[in-house]
Amino acid sequence: MTRPVRNYKWKDGKTLSLGDVSLVMGILNVTPDSFSDGGLWNTKEHAMSHMKDMAADGAAMIDVGAESTRPGHTELTAEEETARLMQLLPLLLDESSVPISIDSYHYETMEKALSAGAHMVNDVWGFQYDDGSMAAVTAAHGVPAILMHNQNDTVYEGDIISSMKSFFDRTLSIAFAAGVKEENIILDPGIGFGKTGEQNMEVLARLDELTQAYPYPWLLGVSRKRFIGTILDLPAEERDEGTAAVNLWGIEKGCTLFRVHDVKTTAREVKMWDALRKQARLQHGGK
């Protein structure tokens, strides 16, 4: 399956190329309460060290989040989130060798982060949390945006994929109305958000119905999530093998970018899988 190609270059010289090579996004939660690593990286020394380790281990970019979005999380105000993020972000930007995305649905936080030099938006509400302000901020800064499917409950009227397509159609309408460029859009099916375990599995099984419906790169973020733990009967810290299996499935279904906690192992896995896919194409005449 051919994946859309995008090449990004920022003012500070950092670059990111999305295409047929699978890339890893390393998760840097500077939170006290994230489900897998809350409290591990929320000091300057620990955050900096972990960021550098993930880049050395093969992360093509780092996703920084200052508010947990796990089920049942404690919501922060935009002011609280911004204060927590900005204690660390300028230092991270100074030292990072790869682009940094910001995981936030507050446009006020995103404005501060992008003004400080952050490279990409990662919005778990796909521009639909506010009145279009997040889309406007993204457009004003001219940066790429990862736009995720989400909803407040797990009730879907009719087919779940059709419902998700309607969501993404609205997201794209908001984006284009605000002036976000088409080449700056990356989509995310939002596995684990507004979906039961069974619904997560259905979306994954039918993921190509989404990736083939839109001409944009797709990010898949399943790292250590609950539905993997339910299937394997394992706690969060023991779900990396299950995560790997889902990520390899995602490659076959058209995803390009994989958001994970375990960067080193994932980078090796997807590189090997890409090599196998390339060899298989060569043996079938490049098809």
Image (spheres, rainbow, N blue to C red):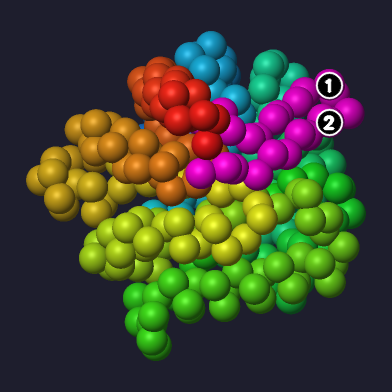
**Spatial distance from mark 2 to mark 1, Cα to Cα?**
5 Å
Question: Tag on residue 13?
Answer: 1
Is residue 161 visible in this depiction of the protein? yes
Q: Position of residue 43 (x, y in %)?
A: 52, 26
Could you tell whether 225 is left or right of 29 in the image?
left
Give the residue at x 83% y 55%: 181
* Span shown in magenta: 1-26
Circle 1 sits in a helix, a strand or a loop, which is it? loop
Is residue 113 positioned above or below 275 on the image? below
Of residues 94 and 233, which is closer to you in this image?
233
Say whether marks 2 and 1 touch (CB < 8 Å). Answer: yes
Considering every residue shown, the one lying at the far front of the view is: 285
Could you tell whether 257 is left or right of 192 in the image?
right
Is residue 65 positioned above or below 74 on the image? above
Sort mark 2 into few (<14), some (14-19) or many (20+) by Cα contacts within 10 Å. Answer: some
Magenta-colored stretch includes residue 21: yes
Amino acid type for the residue under numbered disc 1: Gly
Residue picked out by circle 2: 10
Considering every residue shown, the one lying at the far bottom of the view is: 157
Give the residue at x 86% y 48%: 141
Amino acid type for the residue under numbered disc 2: Trp
Considering every residue shown, the one lying at the far top of the view is: 56
Magenta-colored stretch includes residue 260: no
Q: Position of residue 110 (x, y in %)?
A: 73, 50
Q: Position of residue 103 (x, y in %)?
A: 59, 47
Sort mark 1 into few (<14), some (14-19) or many (20+) by Cα contacts within 10 Å. Answer: few
Q: Position of residue 229 (x, y in %)?
A: 19, 46
Is residue 47 visible in this depiction of the protein? no
Give the residue at x 48% y 38%: 258
Of residues 127 and 163, which is closer to you in this image?
163
Say which quarter of the image contains residue 173: bottom right
Circle 2 sits in a helix, a strand or a loop, which is it? loop
